Image: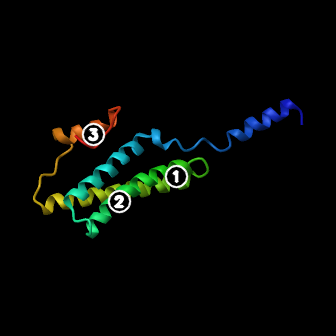
Amino acid sequence: MDNKSEKKEHKATSGLIPAHGGYRSLKSYQMSEIVYDATTAFCNRLIDRRSRTHDQMVQAARSGKQNIAEGSMASGTSRKTELKLVGVARASLEELLLDCEDFLRQKKLALWGKEHPKAKEVRQLAYKKDRSYAL
């Protein structure tokens, strides 16, 4: 094969598998990392470490973060796998949300609506350069 043909073949095959990974730059991954860190701190402070609830909440937060990363890594070879893992991440984070709502309800604490100033403050973390769950 001559040099010109090799370049054509390389160009055709290099686009065959799209780039994947780079999940650390995804806003969803960055926010899931904050959610995981905040959940761990919250549970360690307010929920008995030996309880099933503590374990469930921390694992749901971790699963959300890990499945976003795994889905991103799989995106280069399988869109189906990527979508499945992102779906698992969403389900894990929904499970965590329900656990948080249960905690608030059982303790008779306020549940912030989306327009509550503190809820807005938390959402603004996504736009900060040095993100942290510590408000």
User: Mark 2 vs mark 3: which is more N-terminal?
Assistant: 2
Categorize mark 2 by other alpha carbons within 10 Å: few (<14), some (14-19), many (20+): many
Where does residue 65 sit, x and y in percent of width and height? 41, 52
* Residue that label 3 marks: 123
Q: Label 3 is placed on what type of residue?
A: Arg
> Of the residues tagged 2 and 1, which is closer to the observer?
2
Residue at the far top in the pictured view: 4
| Secondary element type, mark 3 | helix
Residue at the far left in the pictured view: 108
* Residue that label 1 marks: 82
For the point 25% across and 58% down, the residue is: 44
The Cα–Cα distance between marks 2 and 3, rounded to whole angstroms, is: 20 Å
Q: Label 2 is placed on what type of residue?
A: Ala
| Secondary element type, mark 1 | helix
Where does residue 91 sit, x and y in percent of width and height? 37, 58
* Residue that label 2 marks: 60
For the point 44% across and 54% down, the residue is: 66
Along the viewing direction, whichever of 105 and 40 lies nearer the viewer: 40
Name the quadrant containing residue 9. top right
For the point 26% across and 69% down, the residue is: 50
Looking at the rendering, in which quadrant would you find the N terminus?
A: top right
User: Mark 2 vs mark 1: which is more N-terminal?
Assistant: 2
> Of the residues tagged 3 and 1, which is closer to the observer?
3
For the point 19% across and 59% down, the residue is: 46
